[in-house]
């Protein structure tokens, strides 16, 4: 299930966000997604679903490892790490030890190199205040557990929008 902030034109807004996200995915032969989740089972599930949808997937077990991969960790010189420029989307769990998905998203959006990379926040909790907060920087907020139909419905939406 995909959730967006309720607004008078909420449905249109959601379809637009999905379309913008998948345009990036469809623009390359094999889009590269960074999947961040501290739970091994959830991380493997997201990885498998994305790979079934023809995505290259890199995984990280927490926010710090994700920042290191992207070259954005405090001890790294971001100009020497090219991994970040190869990522087409970041999908992260919200509730992780050390750094929440929202905190990770804020750090990514502070980077001039990574600020425009689409991001998705996942959570098993349907908390409106959390959703509103996350939607300030994320394109999509999804409820866990993700299913293949979630990824497929995103693909169907973009194909319909492209007509």
Image (cartoon, helix red, strand yellow):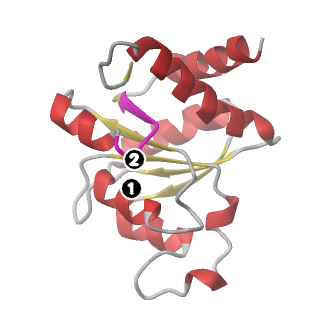
For image coordinates 32% across by 18% down, the residue present is 7
User: Is 24 or 9 nearer to us in this picture?
Assistant: 9
Q: Which residue is mark 1?
A: 105
The answer to whether 53 appears left or right of 37 in the picture is right
Asked whether residue 138 is in view, the answer is yes
**Which part of the image, by quadrant, shows the C terminus?**
top right
Could you tell me how far apart the alpha carbons at marks 1 and 2 are, in whole angstroms?
A: 7 Å
**Which part of the image, by quadrant, shows the N terminus?**
top left
User: Is 15 or 26 nearer to us in this picture?
Assistant: 15
SS at badge 2: loop
Q: Quadrant of residue 80?
A: bottom right
Point out the frontmost of discs 1 and 2: 2
For image coordinates 53% across by 18% down, the residue present is 15
Residue 115, compared with residue 76, is above or below; it is above
Query: Badges 1 and 2: C-beta atoms under 8 Å apart?
Result: yes
User: Is 124 or 104 nearer to us in this picture?
Assistant: 104
Number of numbered discs:
2
Q: Quadrant of residue 75?
A: bottom left
SS at badge 1: helix
Q: Quadrant of residue 49?
A: top right
Q: Which residue is mark 2?
A: 137
The answer to whether 114 appears left or right of 14 in the picture is right
Asked whether residue 62 is in view, the answer is no
Q: Position of residue 121 (x, y in %)?
A: 38, 41
Q: Position of residue 51 (x, y in %)?
A: 65, 37
For image coordinates 34% across by 13% down, the residue present is 8
Give the magenta-colored segment's residue range. 136-142
For image coordinates 35% across by 28% down, the residue present is 145
Residue 46, compared with residue 90, is above or below; it is above
Q: Position of residue 143 (x, y in %)?
A: 33, 27
């Amino acid at each position: 299930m995909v959730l967006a902030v309720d607004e008078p034109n909420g449905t249109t807004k959601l379809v637009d966000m999905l379309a913008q996200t998948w345009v990036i995915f469809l623009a390359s032969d094999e889009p590269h997604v960074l999947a961040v989740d501290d739970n091994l089972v959830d991380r493997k599930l997201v990885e498998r679903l994305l790979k079934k949808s023809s995505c290259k997937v890199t995984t990280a077990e927490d926010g710090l490892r994700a920042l290191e991969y992207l070259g954005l960790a405090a001890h790294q010189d971001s100009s020497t790490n090219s991994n970040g420029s190869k990522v087409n989307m970041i999908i992260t769990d919200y509730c992780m030890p050390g750094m929440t998905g929202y905190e990770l998203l804020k750090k990514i959006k502070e980077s001039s190199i990574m600020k425009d990379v689409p991001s998705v926040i996942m959570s098993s909790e349907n908390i409106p205040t959390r959703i509103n907060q996350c939607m300030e920087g994320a394109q999509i907020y999804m409820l866990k557990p993700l299913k293949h139909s979630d990824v497929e419905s995103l693909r169907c939406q973009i194909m319909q929008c492209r007509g």
